[in-house]
Image: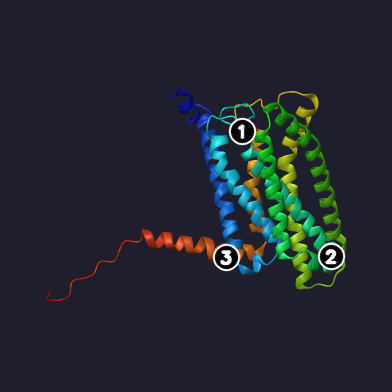
């Protein structure tokens, strides 16, 4: 009973002003992640033209994984739990998987934009909407297949699999992401600038710049934890030195990125922003205002 009450208590005792601020920050961060990603995903789902473009399918995948990240942060970030292999309050590797899914979605979107710009004719024939959805389903299935393997084997074996996978996977994926980022920047800077001004060229340029900005912010918030985990696995030191993920700045940064990514999508895409304002936020605000207005009372008829 005491263990259960301990789990459902805040990670830091609310006995000082700093601890209260940290608690409120964690609550606000989780709420912001959920609100912004739900708003962005609704905007894509409510706009048929956006749903027909492959890049918005990757945006939708990122939003879904980040919504799960925000919801799970109420547990691993706000409460007094520790999400490690041998912890009684662990999430069985599910919560880190949502962060990994966001990473894979952004990498896949970057490769998609690169293919679309370099080989536009081949891309339009190969990467149909159904094939794009199959790619998204494939990396979601792969991520939870790895989760199942981690939970079926012994803890020691799972730790070795994670250390080897993190060491090689993170290095390879980051190198690929940085390389694609440089190539996309060169394409946007030189190749697209030489093309004749048109609506299609503007759409290509804006989509490339948007994914570039998203990836830059992603690398800025993820590289510290990548370097830390890689160094820990390489030298064999203990990586979990903080009380939980809500008190570890290296693990807070990826959650901040989960709130920044939908903001970048909204800021960088005019069609998404217009749909968000006209079909998501404005109708919700109108319903709230109407609900707060006092009801009209019928005036009695004369002589009644």
Using residue 281 as the reference point, say whether residue 145 is left or right of it.
right
Q: Is residue 115 left or right of residue 82?
A: right
The Cα–Cα distance between marks 1 and 2, rounded to whole angstroms, is 42 Å
Residue behind mark 3: 46
Q: Are marks 1 and 2 in contact (CB under 8 Å)?
A: no
Q: Secondary structure at mark 3?
A: helix
Residue lying at 82% horizontally and 60% vertically, measured from the top left: 115
CA gap between label 3 and label 1 equals 34 Å
Decide: is 242 above or below 262: above
Write down the quadrant of residue 44 in the picture: bottom right
Q: Residue at x 64, y 56 (%)?
A: 60
| Outermost residue, left side | 303
| In this rendering, the label closer to the viewer, 3 or 2 | 3
- Point out residue 238 in the picture as x, y percentages from the top left corner: 71, 24
Which residue is drawn at the image coordinates 47% and 60% (left, top)?
284
Picture coordinates of residue 181, whole percent (x, y): 81, 51
The mark that comes first in sequence, 3 or 2, is: 3
Precedes in sequence: disc 3 or disc 1? 3
Q: Which residue is mark 1?
A: 245
Local packing at callout 3 (Cα closer than 10 Å; few below 14, some 14-19, many 20+) is some
Q: Quadrant where the C terminus lies?
A: bottom left
Q: Nearer the viewer, residue 133 or 51?
A: 133
The N terminus lies in quadrant? top left
């Amino acid at each position: 009973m005491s263990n259960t009450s301990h789990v459902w208590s805040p990670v830091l005792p609310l006995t000082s002003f700093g601890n209260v601020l940290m608690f409120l920050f964690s609550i606000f961060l989780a709420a912001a992640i959920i609100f912004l990603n739900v708003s962005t995903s609704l905007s894509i789902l409510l706009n048929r033209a956006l749903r027909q473009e492959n890049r918005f399918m990757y945006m939708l995948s990122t939003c879904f994984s980040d919504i799960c990240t925000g919801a799970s942060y109420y547990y691993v970030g706000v409460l007094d739990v520790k999400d490690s292999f041998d912890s009684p309050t662990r999430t069985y590797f599910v919560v880190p998987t949502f962060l990994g899914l966001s990473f894979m979605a952004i990498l896949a979107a970057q490769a998609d934009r690169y293919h679309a710009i370099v080989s536009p004719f081949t891309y339009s024939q190969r990467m149909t909407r159904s094939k794009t959805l199959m790619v998204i389903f494939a990396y979601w299935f792969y991520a939870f297949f790895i989760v199942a393997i981690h939970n079926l084997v012994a803890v020691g074996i799972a730790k070795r699999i994670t250390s080897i996978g993190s060491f090689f996977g993170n290095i390879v994926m980051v190198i690929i992401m940085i390389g694609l980022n440089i190539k996309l920047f060169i394409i946007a800077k030189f190749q697209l600038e030489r093309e004749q001004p048109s609506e299609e060229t503007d759409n290509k340029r804006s989509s490339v710049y948007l994914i570039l900005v998203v990836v830059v912010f992603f690398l800025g918030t993820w590289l510290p934890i990548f370097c830390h985990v890689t160094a820990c696995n390489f030298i064999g030191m203990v990586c979990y030195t903080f009380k939980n993920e809500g008190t570890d700045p290296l693990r807070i940064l990826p959650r901040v990125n989960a709130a920044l990514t939908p903001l970048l999508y909204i800021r960088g895409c005019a069609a998404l922003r217009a749909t968000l304002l006209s079909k998501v936020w404005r109708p919700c605000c109108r319903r709230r205002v109407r609900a707060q207005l006092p009801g009209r009372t019928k005036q009695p008829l004369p002589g009644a």
